[in-house]
């Protein structure tokens, strides 16, 4: 198991940008997928962005070209660049790592970082 720690959240005005980071306690170079989710008050957790080990990316329908998921070359961190933030982007953002060991999956979640977008 690896521990994940998000950082980079905070308060931003509508139209602003934030860069979230997820640091792993160990190497996640072998991760099959790294993802960002978010959960707003009273709503279900939803996928924001996903990056597979083959480089394929998926974004939530709300993203509209404003977000970019990436990971660093050392394999122990990944990021979410968010631009043109809107008030409905206010949520707790969680990072997530999925790894498969033969037929056994391992899922790890971070504790979350609060993003608040004010109008």
Image (cartoon, rainbow, N blue to C red):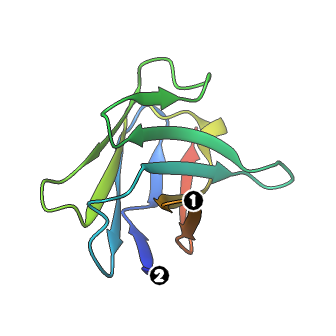
Residue 50 rendering spot, x and y as whole percentages: 47, 39
In the image as oriented, which residue stretches furthest toward the front?
Answer: 102
Residue 58 rendering spot, x and y as whole percentages: 49, 28
- How far apart in space, not on screen, are marks 2 and 1 (Cα)? 16 Å
Quadrant of residue 104 within the rendered picture: bottom right
Establish if 96 lies above or below 65: below
Query: Is residue 40 left or right of 21 when viewed as pictured?
Result: right
Q: Residues within 10 Å of mark 1 (few under 14, many from 20)?
A: few
Q: Give the residue displayed 41% in from the left and 25% down from the top.
A: 66
Tell which of 6 and 70 is nearer to you: 70
Residue 99 rendering spot, x and y as whole percentages: 47, 60
Say what secondary structure mark 1 lies in: loop
Q: Give the residue displayed 36% in from the left and 48% down from the top.
A: 18
Establish if 73 lies above or below 58: below
Task: Nearest to the eye among marks 2 and 1: give it.
Answer: 1
Q: Give the residue displayed 33% in from the left and 43% down from the top.
A: 53
Say what secondary structure mark 2 lies in: loop
Q: Which residue position is annotated with label 2?
A: 1
Tell which of 69 and 98 is nearer to you: 98
Q: Give the residue displayed 48% in from the left and 35% down from the top.
A: 85
In the image as oriented, which residue stretches furthest toward the left?
Answer: 73
Q: Which residue position is annotated with label 1?
A: 103
């Amino acid at each position: 198991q690896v521990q994940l720690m998000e950082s980079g959240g905070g308060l931003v005005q509508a139209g602003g940008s934030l860069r979230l980071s997820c640091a792993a306690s160990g190497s996640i170079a072998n991760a099959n997928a790294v993802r960002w989710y978010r959960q707003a008050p009273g709503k279900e957790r939803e996928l924001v962005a996903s990056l597979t080990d083959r480089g394929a990316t998926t974004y939530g329908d709300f993203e509209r070209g404003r977000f970019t998921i990436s990971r660093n070359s050392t394999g122990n961190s990944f990021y979410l660049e968010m631009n043109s933030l809107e008030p409905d982007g206010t949520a707790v953002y969680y990072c997530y790592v999925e790894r498969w060991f033969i037929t056994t999956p391992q899922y790890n979640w971070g504790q979350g970082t609060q993003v608040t977008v004010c109008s």
